[in-house]
Amino acid sequence: MRFVIHPRLSSRLLRLCLSPTQLKIVCSKVAGRDLNAGETSIIGAIAGGFTGIVTTPLDVLKTRLMTQGSTGRYSSLVDATLTIAREEGLGAFMRGWQPRLIWISMGGFVFFPVLEASKKVRLGRMVL
C-alpha cells in the first residue's frame, strides 16, 4: 500500500518525524560526544517503538482488507475505516499495538546500531 502526499506537505511531515538519525543527532549534541553502540540501540528502540504505535491503525486497516477474502466485507479503505469505527469503536484501530511495539522496538534496537557502525566502516572511521 503506497500513500502519495503532496511534496510540500511531505517535507514538513518528515521534519516532524521521529527518526533514529534525528534523535541520535539531538542526543549527541546534548551529550557533547559521539554515542556508543548501547546508546544508539536505545535510540533505535525508542524510534522503532514510536513508529510501531503511530502506524498501528494503518496496519490494522491493511490486515483487515487483506484477510477479508472473498467475503468482500469492505469495498474500499474508506469503507473499512468507517465500518470498523462504527461497529467496533475507535479502539479497534489500536488492536495489537503491544506485540507490534515490542517487535518493532527490538528490530530498531538491533538494526540502528548496525547501520551506524556500517556507515562508520564505509567512511573509514572505525577499525574492526
Image: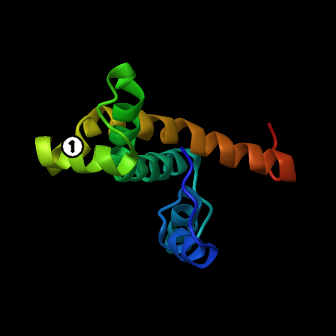
Q: Nearer the viewer, residue 9 or 53?
A: 9
Q: Horizontal and vertical percent for residue 6? A: 59, 72
Residue hosting label 1: 84
Specify the quadrant of the image occupied by residue 97: top left
- The residue furthest top is 70
Position of 29 with respect to 53 (left or right) is right
Which is nearer the eye, 122 or 70?
70
Name the residue nearer the viewer: 54 or 35. 54
Image position of 56 (left or right of 7): left
At a point 56% along the width and 66% down the height, the residue shown is: 5
Q: Is residue 53 visible?
A: no
> Measuring 58% from the left and 60% from the top, which residue is drawn there?
4
Q: Tell me which residue sits at (51%, 71%) in the image.
A: 13
Left or right position of 30 against 99? right
Q: How many marks?
A: 1
The one nearer the camera, 104 or 55, is 55
Amino acid type shown at disc 1: Ile
List x then y, in percent, for residue 12.
54, 77
Q: Position of residue 57 (x, y in %)?
A: 32, 47
Secondary structure under badge 1? helix
Q: Is residue 97 visible?
A: yes
